[in-house]
Image (cartoon, rainbow, N blue to C red):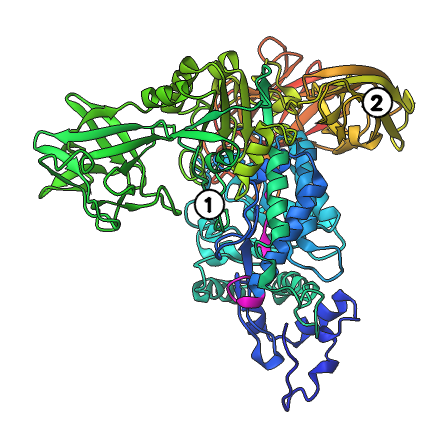
Amino acid sequence: MNEPITSPERPDPRQDTFRDPGAPVADRVRDLLGRLTLEEKIGLLHQYQAPVERLGVTAFRTGTEALHGLAWLGPATVFPQAIGLASTWNPELVRRVGEATADEVIAFHHKDPAGAGRNVWAPVVNPLRDPRWGRNEEGYSEDPWLTGLMGTAYARGLRGDLDVLKTAPTLKHFLAYNNETDRCVSSSNLPPRVLREYELKAFRPAIESGAAVAVMPSYNLVNGRPAHLSPLINEELRTWSDDDVLVVSDAYAPANLAGLQGYHEDLPTAYAHAIRAGLDSFTQDDAATEATLGHIRTALDRGLLAEEDIDAAVRHALSIRVRLGEFDPATPYDGIDEEVVNRPEHQRLAREAARQSITLLKNDGILPLGSPRRIAVIGPLADVLLEDWYSGTLPYQVTARAALAERCETLHCEGVDRIALHTDDGYVTAADDVTGGPLRVGPQAGPERSAFDLFDWGGGAYAFRAAANGRHVSVGDDGVLINDQPGPNGWEVRQTFRMEERLRGVVLRHISTGRYVAVDGGVLTITDDPEAAVVLTVELVESGAAKAARVAAEADVAVVVVGDHPLVNGRETEDRADLALPAAQENLVKAVHEANRATVLVISSGYPFAVNWADEHVPAIIWSAHGGQEYGHALADVLFGDEDPGGRLTQTWYRSACELPDLFDYDIIATDSTYLYYRGAPLYPFGHGLSYGRFHYSDLVLSSDDLGPDETLVVRVTVTNTGWRAGEEVVQVYTHQQRSRVKQPLRQLRGFEKVRLAPGESRTVAVPVPIADLAFWDVTRGRFVVEEAAHKVQVGRSSRSVFLCAPFTVKGERVPPRDVFTRPLDAIDHDEYDGVVLCDAAPESGDAVRSAGPGAWIVFRRADLGRGASACDLSVSSTEGGVLTLRLDDPLFGETIGTVTVPPAATRYDFVEAGTPLAGAAGVRDLYVVFESEGVTVRALRFCR
C-alpha cells in the first residue's frame, strides 16, 4: 500500500483517479499510465519494476513461488506436491490449499514487501503428457480438462473471492512444455487439433473464469517459434478475459531469443518482437535491470517499437497492481500477519490434503492393518521428508517412521548399502567433525571414517553419505570433495555422482560439472581429464537389503518406503530416461518381501514408476506425491484404517518407457499417447485408486438419449457401499464418440463426483456433460464442431474400470468434404502426416510444414476437387530447392496429378509461388503432398478450377 504524498506538483494526490478504489480499474490504470513519462514506463517492463517516487508509486517485483505452499522465503506450511493435490480429485480442497498459501504470502509480504511479492508464479497447468518429464511433480494431470479444473481451483484460492486480489496468480508455462532435455532449443510439434483440444484447453479455464490473471510463457519453441514470441498470446490467450492479462517471462528466457535460440540477431530486435507479441515483464539478470531496459530503449531508437507498444505492456502491469489494491487507502487483507503462517488450521489442512492424496494401487487384503505389535519401517524415505525445488521450508517433519512409532513398536532400517572405497594407495576417508572436511586417501582410520552409505536415486545417480558424521559428500567451489551437506540440495546439485566401469574398478563422475574424481596430494578433487580419474574399488561393508531383510523378519508387518529424490533424476533441467524404480530400491523391496510376506510397499514420488515386480508379488502398494510436513500422519491414518485412501491417479502408470513415444513428440493423437488414445494395457490406468469400501454401481440413467449442441446431458448413477467399512469413491464419467471424420479419443473424462459412503449407504450421483464439450477442432474450416454422431457414456471408478455404459446421439453437424477452391489450404491444416516437422512460416506469425527427409508427406482427407481442378499454386520455400508431387489417395502408389519444382531461396522465410497444371484432379479424393526432397517448406496450396 502506498500512502498519498503531497508536493508542489500534486497538492492533493488523494484526488488522483488511480488512487480511487471506487473508480473502474480501466480508468485508474489509464489515469496512472497518462502521468508517466516514457522513461518511467520503460522502468516498469522488468521483473523488478522501478519506483516512481514523484507519484508515490513504490517498487514492485513479480514472481513469488507458491506451487504447493509459499516457497524460498523461510518456514511456511508445506502441502503435498501439485500432482498430489490433484490426486485428491477434490477441487474444493485444492482451492482451500491455495487460499491458505495466499494468506501466508500476504503475511510474508507485510513483513518484507520487497522480498515477498504478491504476484505468485503458480499454478503449473502444463498437461502431463509424458511421465518422464523432469517437472512432472509440478503439474496436475495428463487430462487437460482435469488440469484446467485443478489449476482453476488452486488459482481461485490464491486470488481470493473479493474484487481486490489477494494475490495475482500466474499460469505456467505457455505452451507445450514437457521436456527438460534441450528445453531452450527444442521445438514442440503442435498440430492444430493437439493445440486446440489438448494444450489450450488446460490454460483457458483459469483465465476465462478470472481465477488467474497472469501467464508465463515457456522456454521452448512451438512449431519453430519461441514460445515467448507466440502470436497466440495476443490472438488467443488474451481473448479469454475482459480483464488485462499480465505476461511475464520465465527466468533468463528473453536473452535466449538472440542467444541459445538464435531467433534474432540481437537483443533489441528480440525484445521488441517480444513486447509486440505480448510480453510485459522481462525476468532477466535478476535485479540488474540496466541491460534489459537499455535494449528496449535501443529498440525504440531504431523504430522497432512505438510508445504505443510500451503503453500496452505497461497497462497490463499496472492493471494487476491496481487490482491488488496497491494504490487503495486500505485492503481487506491488511490484518493478515505472521500468526497465519503454519497455524493449526493450516497444519490440519496439510494433513487432510496429504491423506486425500494417498492412492491405494493394490490391496490383497493386508490393509488396513489390524493390530500389529511391531512394524518394520524400511527404506531410504522411511524417516525423512524431502523438499523439491519449489517447496517451502518445512517447519517440522512427520515422517512415516515417526507417525507409525506413535501407533506401535517400530524397527527401522534405511536399507542402503554401506561401502568403502579404496585405491592402490589406501582407503577414502572422511572427517568425523560435524562440519566435515576434505575426503582423503590414506590408511584406514577406523571403520566409521572409511565407510559411506550409498544412495541409489535412479538414472545412474548416486549420493554418498559419510558414516563418520552423517553428512553427504559434495564438491566445493574449489573442486575438493567434502562431507558437509545434509543431502542433495540447491539449484545446482553438487552431491551426486555416476559410477563408470573401468578395467580395475570404477571411477566417479560428478554429475553437476561432468568432471571426474581424482586424487591430488592425497585429497579427492575433480578434474576435466578422464584419464586422471582415480580408479576405485567398491567394497561392500554391509548390504542394506540383507540388513533390511533381517529387520523385516522380526516384525509382524514390513512397510517399505521408496521413491525419488525430488532434486535428483527427474527435476527441472533433467528428464528421466526410463520409468524403473532405482535398482537398489527394487532389490530392497524384493529382499524385504522374501523375509516377510506381509509387506506393504509405499512409494513417495513426483512421478509414476513401472513397479511391475511389486505389482505381481507385494500384497499392498500405496503411492503418494511427496506429501509435505504432515505426510507421516496421513500415511499412518490410511495404513491403520482411521481414514480411507482418498487418492486417484491423474496420469497413466505404464509398464515400461518402451510404451511411450519419443519424448519430443507432442502429437498425442498420432502417437496414441495418454489415456485418451493409448491402446495398450497400463500397469495402473488413469483414474485408478482403491478404497477400503466396496462399491456397486447401478441404475444408470441419462437425461436424454438424443441431444443438440446447446443442450446438457445429465448422467445419473446410483453408487452403493456394499462393504463393511466406510469409504470414498470417485465416480468418473467418460464418453466416447463412436463415429467421426477424425480419430477420436478412446475415452475422455467429462466429469466426476467424490462421495463418502457408510456401509450399506447408497447415493445417486448426477454429473452434467455439456454437449458443447464434445466438440473437436475441424481443420477443414478452422473452428470447433459438434459432429452428428453416436456416443457412449462410460461410468466407473477409473478409465479402464467401467461398470455401466449407455448410448446417446448428438444432433450435430456433418463435416462436409474439404472445399479447396473457396480459400487456400493452409499446409498446417492437414489431416495426417509422415516425416515432416511443423515450423514457423514467418517470425511474427503463421505456421508451415517442412520435410525432414525425402518421401515425407501430408494428406488432406476428402478434398473436394469438384468437376476438376486445372492448376495448383503452392507457397513454398527451400534454401536448396526441391520437388513436390501431388498424388491422390496414396502417397506411394496414388495417381500423380502434378509435380512442382521448388526453386532455391535465400532464406527459409522467402516463400515463392510455384505452380503445376493438374491432370485427373476431380471428385472427392484424399490429396497427398509428397516431398521428394529434404528441407522443402510448404505454407499453403491454392487451386484453380
Describe the element under mark 1 as helix, strand or loop.
loop
Disc 1 crowd, CA 10 A, few/some/many (<14, 14-19, 20+): some
Q: Is residue 490 above or below residue 320?
A: above
Under mark 2, the amino acid is Val
Quarter occupied by the N terminus: bottom right
Between circles 2 and 1, the one closer to the viewer is: 2
Dot 2, how many residues are within 10 Å of its Cα: few (below 14), some (14-19), or many (20+)?
A: many
Instruction: Using the rendered image of the protein, determine whether residue 355 is visible from the camera's viewpoint.
Output: yes
Residue that mark 2 sits on: 717
Q: Is residue 126 magenta?
A: yes
When the figure is inspected, residue 23 is found, relative to residue 154, above or below; the finding is below
> Which mark is drawn over residue 389?
1
Task: Give the residue displayed 76% in from the left and 71% down from the top.
Answer: 21
Residue found at the very far top of the displayed protein: 893
The quadrant holding residue 22 is bottom right
605 or 905, nearer to the observer: 605
Q: Amino acid at mark 1?
A: Trp
**Is 541 in the magenta?**
no
- In the image, the segment drawn in magenta is 110-127
Q: Residue 320 falls in which quadrant of the image? A: bottom right
Looking at the picture, how far across and down is residue 224, in whole percent? 53, 38
Residue 871: x %, y % from top left: 69, 24
Say which residue appears at 69% left-offset and 42% top-offset: 93
Horizontal and vertical percent for residue 351? Answer: 60, 41
Question: Compared with residue 243, is residue 914 higher up or lower down, i.e. above or below?
Answer: above
The answer to whether 298 appears left or right of 515 in the picture is right
Dots 2, 1 in contact, CB < 8 A: no
| For residue 287, above or below residue 359 | below
Give the left or right position of residue 766, taking residue 566 as reference.
right
The quadrant where residue 376 appears: top left
Counting from the top left corner in percent of width and height, residue 29 is at: 70, 68
